Amino acid sequence: VQLQASGGGWVQPGGSLRLSCAASGFTLADYAVGWFRQAPGKAREGVSITSIREGRAYYADSVKGRFTISRDIAKNSVYLQMNSLKPEDTAVYYCAASYLGGLSVATDEYNYWGQGTQVTVSS
């Protein structure tokens, strides 16, 4: 059972990145999937969550209108499209899967975690 997060990198303010979260060993569509981020010296925070089978989505206020979460059931993957990136979006981004299936941002409700991918937004 594994989650693999990828797609991070360096981008200038206003730029875009697309993060991918690929699952192996289990069916991601049976889980809620969340993207979390953690900046140096700060707690891990929930950025965006998609409920089971992409029925509903949650976005943190800080990313509403700029980030979009989506699923590709055939590829057993979830994506986070990040547009209009700001320096304050700089963090390590993690994807996680929760069997509970809802839109919780409580990290202890997530069963599986990816390894994290660094996003750096700077000029």
Image (tube, rainbow, N blue to C red):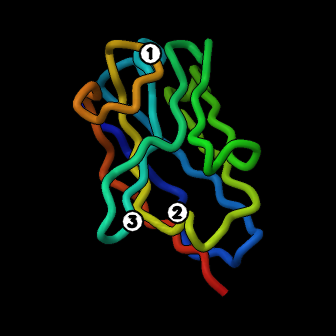
For image coordinates 32% across by 45% down, the residue present is 114
For image coordinates 61% across by 50% down, the residue present is 62
State the residue position of label 3.
39
Packing grade of label 3 (10 A; few <14, some 14-19, many >=20) is: some
Tell me the element at label 1: loop
Of residues 61 and 93, the one drawn nearer to the viewer in this rendering: 61
Tell me the element at label 3: loop
Query: Which mark sits nearer the N-terminus, 2 or 3?
Result: 2
State the residue position of label 1.
102
Q: Amino acid at mark 2?
A: Gly
State the residue position of label 2.
8
Q: Is disc 3 in contact with disc 1, using a CB cutoff of under 8 Å?
A: no
Figure disc tally: 3
For image coordinates 64% across by 48% down, the residue present is 63
Residues under labels 2 and 3: Cα distance? 14 Å
Q: Position of residue 87 (x, y in %)?
A: 60, 73
Q: Amino acid at mark 3?
A: Ala
